Image: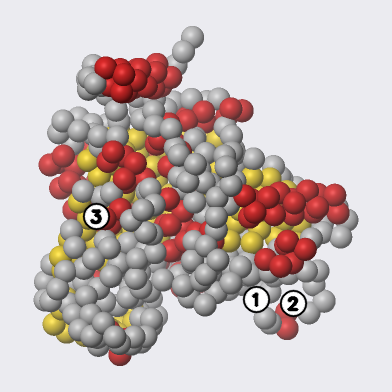
Amino acid sequence: MLSKLTLWRLTVFLSFFLYVACGEKPSVEEPNEKRPNIIYILADDLGYGDIGAFNPDGKIKTPFIDQMAKDGLLFTDAHSPSAVCTPTRYGILTGRYSWRSPLKQGVLTGKSKALIPETRTTVASLMKNAGYQTAFIGKWHLGWDWAQKDSTLNAGEGWNPSDFDNLDFTKAVTNTPNDLGFDYAYGHSGSLDMAPYAYVENGTITANVDHVTEDKGKYTWWRKGPTAADFKHDEVTPNFFNKATEYIKENGKGEKPFFMYLALPSPHTPILPTEEWLGKSGLNPYSDFVMMIDAYVGRLVQEIDNQGLTDNTLIIFTSDNGCSPQADFDVLGEKGHHPSGIFRGHKADIYEGGHRVPFIMKWPARIQKNSISKTLVCQTDLMATLADLVAVKLRANEGEDSFSMLPIMQNTDEKFGRAAVVHHSINGSFAIRKDNYKLIFCPGSGGWSAPKPDSDELSGLPKFQLYDLEKDPAEEENLYATQPETVDELAALMVTYIEKGRSTQGPKQSNASLSLNGGKWHQIDAIMAH
């Protein structure tokens, strides 16, 4: 018997076929056939072990996100395409690994120019063309183009206060999320610790940028830089949730369904729980901040219910990478909490703690409650999943690293097409994971934990690392020297993914050969030579 989800997809496809063949608009207006509203909530630097549903031994209380997991589908083996912010966000919106773009390592700043060209299909443009309202609210961190006083000057990348002297905040911003398919866009440019500190709404800065701020607290620090009159750091996270709630109220019952990408700047630094939440966790400010985010997620879910939208709204909750050491792992560890759970490493690392993330889907009309999937998935899979939902076939140069998760949502995991996932660290180091084996193409973490890149800690270590994650989830026993056949198989698959410009089936695509930040494909020669 066909599932409700399969029947719904067939209805959408046949309606679209009639539209193309007969010039008639597709009709999917029956109550049980309506396309779902979709909300994608992306936390920032939230660890796999910070959510109770993923880490029962954790000490941070997250009842609302835990309830979402009970009401839907929890993924135990979900991964961000990168261990840091910008490349993960690129992958989510394009269905393509960021290392195929000019961003080969590291992240952008709040001043960086737009990374995604208008010619590339994004999840937003895909859904807009499929008849959805589309909205972005939150932290962008994919670059947009601030106006300049003198276009001939290049005053730095955005790490220092003087780098912003040439920006003209009285003029509109260009190459914004609106140019990539978002009907509505409201947010700030980089991380919450990266200047400029200003809200931009549909290309317009919402208030005068009239002063400079900075903070140097242990948890609350942010870089010195120009700040708008309406921008208060400790109010940013609540503001984004409030904006999202307003959007749901205004658009939830419109003629078109909506796709909303809610990209939180938290619990990334500055760690700023509001006064109401300070001390609530009994652990430290980071834990207070996570509890605050959990409560706001609960309020958002409640608003969806208040509007009568719960049954046919798909909510996805996840994080862009692992937890940052700024959370103070020593203090948390002393109190029995480990943000990466049982996994090694943290944000920036090639180890599991860098890229294994919490991932939850809730869609009461189509997803069975209390479902758990152990299938290996990646956040780049959003594009193919949504394309499948709205019966749109991706073109050869769209979603090159994206696989539809609909089979998993239908509880037919064996039909899921992904064979492997490529991981990427902050310094550009690679790993590839297939089944229970993970091959790391560097001798250390490729990030911020030991053994660090270019350190004496690497002396005497094998050039690559191989781990059996089923037997050794903490990545403690390197099998590189004892399983050469596995190493060769995974290295060859990685070479194929590089050379083909894609990990999905289809014609060969190109990878960008130039880097926008001076980076390179770390150890790419060693991978290709192997």
Q: Which residue is mark 1?
A: 452
Q: Residue furthest top?
A: 1
Q: Which residue is mark 3?
A: 178
Query: Closest to the observer: 494 or 261?
Result: 494
Q: Say which residue appears at 18% left-offset and 36% top-offset.
A: 252
Q: Is residue 400 left or right of residue 362?
A: right
Looking at the image, is mark 3 or mark 1 earlier in the sequence? 3
Mark identifier at residue 458: 2
As displayed, is residue 464 above or below residue 50? below
Element type at mark 2: helix
Q: Residue 313, image x and y in percent? A: 30, 33
Element type at mark 3: helix
Q: Quadrant of residue 364?
A: top left
Cα distance between the residues tagged 3 and 2: 45 Å
As displayed, is residue 400 above or below residue 239? above
Q: Nearer the viewer, mark 3 or mark 2?
A: 3
Q: Say which residue appears at 17% left-offset and 84% top-offset.
A: 211
